[in-house]
Structures are given as C-alpha cells and as structure tokens.
Image: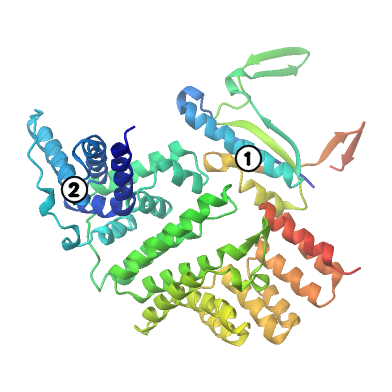
Amino acid sequence: MAREDLTAKARAEEVARASYGRLLALLAARTGDIPGAEDALGDAFVQALTSWPVGGVPDNPEGWLITVARNRQRDRAKSAAVRTSEPLEEPPVFDEIDLDAIPDKRLELMFVCAHPAIDPGIRTPLMLQTVLGFEAEQIARAFAMPASTMAQRLVRAKRRIRDARIPFVVPTVRDMPARLPGVLEAIYGAYAIDWLLVSGDEVRESLSAEALYLASTLASLLDEPEAAGLAALLALSLARAPARTVDGRYVPLDEQDPALWDAELIAAGERWLRHASRADRLGRFQLEAAIQSVHCARARTGDTDWAALLVLYDALVALAPTLGAQVSRAVTLARIDGPNTGLATLDAIEGADRFQPVWAARAHLLAELGNTDAAARAYAKAISLTTEPGLREYLRARIDELPG
Amino acid sequence: MRYSLIMHYPEMTEADLGTEAMNEGKAAFDDYAKALNDAGVLISAEVLQQSSNTTTLTMRDGHLKVQDGPFADTKEQLGGLFVVDVADLDAALAWAEKCPAAYYGVIEIRPGAVHFEDGAWHGKI
C-alpha cells in the first residue's frame, strides 16, 4: 500500500473514532432510522477509503462524510419510493458544512437509546454501538454474550426505534426527571459491567474509559447535576484503576498506593463534582462521587476522613439502599465506632446472605476482633462465593495471615 | 457438598447457529470449565449430543423395550451437566450464575445424595 493510502486510511479511521456518534446521530435524527443511517455512514466511509487515497483527504472530512452519507440516504429514499435506481451523483457540497454549527444530536441519540420503550438490558449496548461505534462483537465480549445474540438484540432495538417512531428529542424540563435516570444508568452500566463475567481485563478497562467519555459528553451537553455527578464518579473511580491490581494481585482501596492514582483524572473528577454541586440538587451519583473524592483526598492529605465518609454513606443509603452501599457504610462505621458496631450493622442488612462483599467485610472485622475461627469461616464463605481468581487469591492470603 | 448444575436448553445445531456462534459457545464453555477447575470445585463436566441421538430403554414385566428418542419430548432438552463440589447452595448458585447456558437455557441446581467413589458409596440418602 502506498504511503498516501495509509495516511488516508488512518485519517478515515481517526474521523470514524472521533466523530462516529455525532455523524450517526445527525443522520438518524431526521428519519429516526438508525439502521438506515448506519448503512449510509458505512457506505460513506467505504467511499472515503477509495477516494481519499486518490484525491487527497478533504479539508473538512466530517463535512465530506456527512454529505456523501446524506446523498446515499436520499438515494435510498428515492429508490424505495419510485422503485428505480437512478444514478445520483450530485457533486457534494461538503465544504459548506460546519459540523460545529449544527446542534450536537448525540444527546438526542442517548435519550433514544434509553427510552422507556427500549428494554433496559439493551440500552447500554445500544449506546456503545450508536454513540461510540463499537462493533456488536466487542460489546458481546464485554457482556459475556454470544456475538450473534448481541447483534440480533441490537438490530431488534434499532428496528423498534424506527418502527415505533421513538422520537429523537431531548425531554423537556418537566419530563427530564423521568427520563434522565435511564440514560445515566445505561452509561453507568458500561462502567459497572459485572467484571466477574468479563474474562479479559482489557475489554473492561477500555469500556470504563468509554463510559467516562459518554458521561462527560452528556454532562457538557446537558445542565443536570446528576450527569456531572456521574462524570465525576467515573473519573474518580477510573483514577484509582492503576493501583487496583499490582502484579496481578487485587489490592483493596485502603492498601492502595496513592502515588499510582491518576492525578489528572482526579482533577477532572473534582471539577465535575464542583460543577454538579452548584445546582444544589443532591443525587445518588453526586454522593457516590463525593465518596470517591474523600478516598482520593488521601493522595493529598495522607489520611482518610472516615467521619465525612459516614455522613455521605448515611445519605447514600437513605437515597439508594443498595447492598453495596450498605456494606460500605457498615465498614466505615466500624472504622469510627469499632468492629463490633460494624458487625452488628452488617448483620442487620437484609437479603445479603449470598452477597460476597458482606462475607469478606464480616471476615475482616472478625479478624480485627481476634475471633480467628469465626473469621476463617467467614473468609471461607466469601471465597466460596467468589468466582474471580484474583479476588479469591487475595481472600485466601488473608486466611493464611490469620494468627494461630 | 456435591451439586449437579443440570443444563436444559433448546437444541441448536451448528447449521442453526452458524460456525462462528458455535465456536463462541465452545469458547465460553471452555472458559467456564477452566474457571471451575482453577477454583478447585469441578468434579466433572459433560456436554451431551443432541437428544435425537439418544436411546431410551425400559424393562417392564420381563419385556425389554428399546426406543429411539429422549425420555421427555420437550422444547428444552437435557443438554449436559457440571458436577461441582462446593460449600453450600449459595456457592453453587454463584457458579451457576456464570454458566454460559444460563443465558439461553435453564440451569437446574440439584444437590447430590450419594456418589460412588473408590469402591464405596459416600454420603447419605
């Protein structure tokens, strides 16, 4: 392949990565037809790969692609209408198109993907595909699902959007509270994919970075504190990723080396959090982000402010009493009032008998109390509920460290 | 405690699924079996051929009856089983949750009663 070919190909790929969602959203917004827009955009990329190496990369590649794709859409609409395929090669007017002057339709696209009429289970995959241009196969791997099943479900969801005419609109202020959580959950879903199910760390890590990208996009396009809260949460959590496993071994939060945390991501998270707090409307994601922020402050102060954490966990449990939040609150309480209080709080959590973190936390507190036998039993129970090798290894090592 | 994770699922041939999907399925089962093995809980894993290849036999009143086909003719057929040795039902459920067949079939988690090993029965009914 000639050098120019390589450059043109690399450029097309770069545009595809950076602008895929914007272009697709723009093309699909008019018709509501995502599959049709995907086909048109796909054709435009194919055409770019043949024309750019010959005629050079256009000054305005996005404008070029959108013009070609729109012509292709028009082509199809016409041929469907008159059942003839007349050759339609209008000279494109791509240089006149200024993508930045056109309202960003990705926001509408995100709301379409998380519409109440779309099955919650497919919302995250749908967003990953339409906004970020992920292949069904990559998404399937992250969701531990056969690629064919994932592809079918995505196709079905997109058809449903088109056939049921789910509108490409940003909800009004009045409808926003009902619609926003679905979008936030779908983005959070890309970050919080049950990583026990994912065999490769790489897939998971790249997905969490994309989730942060989605959340930041949403937060910058939409003035909603919870959107900024989610962006803050993801940035602050991702910041700690490099310290989470060292030499393939799982390292719990309080044993992590803050020097390994990503200072830039922490700063970005703090900015989003400040931005969110200006609205003075507290929500679950803001609270979770604030909790992460307290943990990250250890990099600066060398200490963890447990009292501040407890206040935040109390508020979080009141607002969203997930098992995970309840366990974390009990562990925080143990730091302040001692292991006995922590244990009593853990025991009071309902429906947690099969929840691995409860057993790991219980084992830890029992060990602190010197109740070695009970601690060993609780660790064993936690291990029996753990299907992830790194975590199991960590818990086994804790048993070995027990005195006696 | 031994548990059998018994998989029931609609039978699909490679022709129905396509080679790619079939290979993905195999890879998923491979990962799963290795994860069970690495955790030291796997006793045995058996994936069965299509129920159309099965033969049923009964002996009633001195009459041997051999028939072509499965015992129960249902949409979802017995497809295979993993026998695991874990602490309790919670642990068995934690593993059953990760079974690839849980996505398209039904996993029955059945505690074992007795098993024969080293020339003797173990456990109690």
Q: Is residue A218 left or right of residue A368?
A: left
- Residue B70 vs A229, above or below: the answer is above
Horizontal and vertical percent for residue B91? 71, 53
Instruction: From the viewer's side, name the closer residue of B56 and A91.
Output: A91
Horizontal and vertical percent for residue B17? 47, 28
Instruction: From the viewer's side, name the closer residue of A69 and A9.
Output: A9
Looking at the image, do the residues carrying marks 2 and 1 touch, with CB atoms under 8 Å apart?
no
Q: Which residue is mark 2?
A: A66
Instruction: From the viewer's side, name the closer residue of B68 and A215.
Output: A215
Horizontal and vertical percent for residue B125? 84, 42
Numbered mark located on residue B31 in the image: 1
- Quadrant in the picture for the C terminus of chain A: bottom right
Question: Label 1 amino acid?
Answer: Asp
Question: Label 2 amino acid?
Answer: Ile
User: In the image as oriented, which residue stretches furthest toward the front?
Assistant: A3
**Quadrant assignment, res A40:** top left
> What residue sits 30% from the left and 60% below the top?
A111
- Say which chain tag 2 marks: A
Is residue B88 visible in the rendered structure shown here?
Answer: yes
Label 1 crowd bin: few (<14), some (14–19), many (20+), radius 10 Å: some
- Mark 2–mark 1 Cα distance, whole angstroms, equals 43 Å
